[in-house]
Structures are given as C-alpha cells and as structure tokens.
Image (tube, helix red, strand yellow):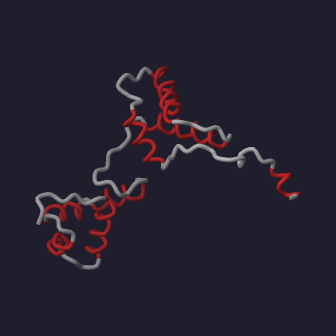
Amino acid sequence: MPNRVFLNLENRIEVLRQYEKGKSARKLAELFNCGRTQSNKVIKEKDLILKEYEDFKFCGVKRMQHEKYVNINETVLEWFKTVRAKKIPASGPMIQHMAKELVDPLGIENLSDSNGWLDRFRIRNSITCRSLCGEAANVNPSSCEGW
C-alpha cells in the first residue's frame, strides 16, 4: 500500500455508497487502497462530503479549496458571459484587467490577478479562450431563412 493516497471527491462519494451497501471501513480501505483512518474519516464526515458534492462544480479535485472572493469571481464571470453573448472575443489579459478594475474600488490588496488565478478561474468555470472563426457571428438570421 502506498504511503499516502488522497481520495478525490468522487472517490469519497463512492466510499460512502459502498459503506451504505454494508461494507466495513477495513474493506473499503482495501478496496480504495487507502488507510483505514481515511475511510473512517470519510464515513464520519458523511454530511459535509455530501453537501460539498452537491455544491462543488469540479469533483475531480483531491482537496476542496474554496474561493476567498466569491462575489468578485461571480461578477467577472457575469461580465465574461455578457461579452461573449455580444460576440466580442475576451482574452485572458482582458479578464485579468476586469478583475483588477473590480478589486481597486473595494481596497482589497492581497488579491492578485495573476496567471495562476486566471488558470483556476478558467478551470472552475469551464472557460476556453478561443477566437471566433469565420463569418458565423456576422450572418443575419433572416437571410439564412431565405436561403
């Protein structure tokens, strides 16, 4: 057995399902190649894990780290959605600049709009920055109906 095996959120949910089927904590530890203490902790924190599973967007992570500034991230996401709805391409630096503009009036000093923040923001919200190709955004729908 490896020294440390971290169970991600999906695996923890599977541990809870197997426990409800009647498997013991020792059998679960053998089944998931983790320690008995870890399987006992998952069983003990059942309510918290189920709540996190319902609320958390990205279930493949091993450690659940919550956002510090949820309102800023939600505002940046809403801005991104409105910009994309208008068919305006939004790049990574544009997203970072928008986050910086939101943070400055609030006086938050320790929030960085770094590339690491941008990468996590993109992963958390399933954002891909791709260019809009072709004339798809420029076509008038009424002319397509006549075709």
Q: Position of residue 73 (x, y in %)?
A: 47, 37
Q: Is residue 93 above or below residue 62?
A: above
Residue in view at x 68 percent, y 47 percent: 134
Residue in view at x 49 percent, y 31 percent: 93
Image quarter of residue 22: bottom left
**Viewer-side residue, 10 vs 50:** 10
Q: Position of residue 55 (x, y in %)?
A: 42, 54
Residue 135 shown left or right of residue 103 in the figure: right
Q: Position of residue 46 (x, y in %)?
A: 29, 62
Image quarter of residue 49: bottom left
Q: Quadrant of the N terminus?
A: bottom left
Q: Is residue 121 above or below residue 103?
A: below
Residue 33 shown left or right of residue 76 in the figure: left
Residue 124 shown left or right of residue 42 in the figure: right
**Viewer-side residue, 44 vs 127:** 127
Q: Is residue 27 above or below residue 59?
A: below
Residue in view at x 43 percent, y 47 percent: 124
Instruction: Name, please, the residue furthest toward the front.
Output: 134
* Total marks placed: 0
Q: Quadrant of the C terminus?
A: bottom right
Residue 62 shown left or right of residue 91 in the figure: left
Q: Position of residue 76 (x, y in %)?
A: 52, 36
Instruction: Name, please, the residue furthest toward the right.
Output: 146
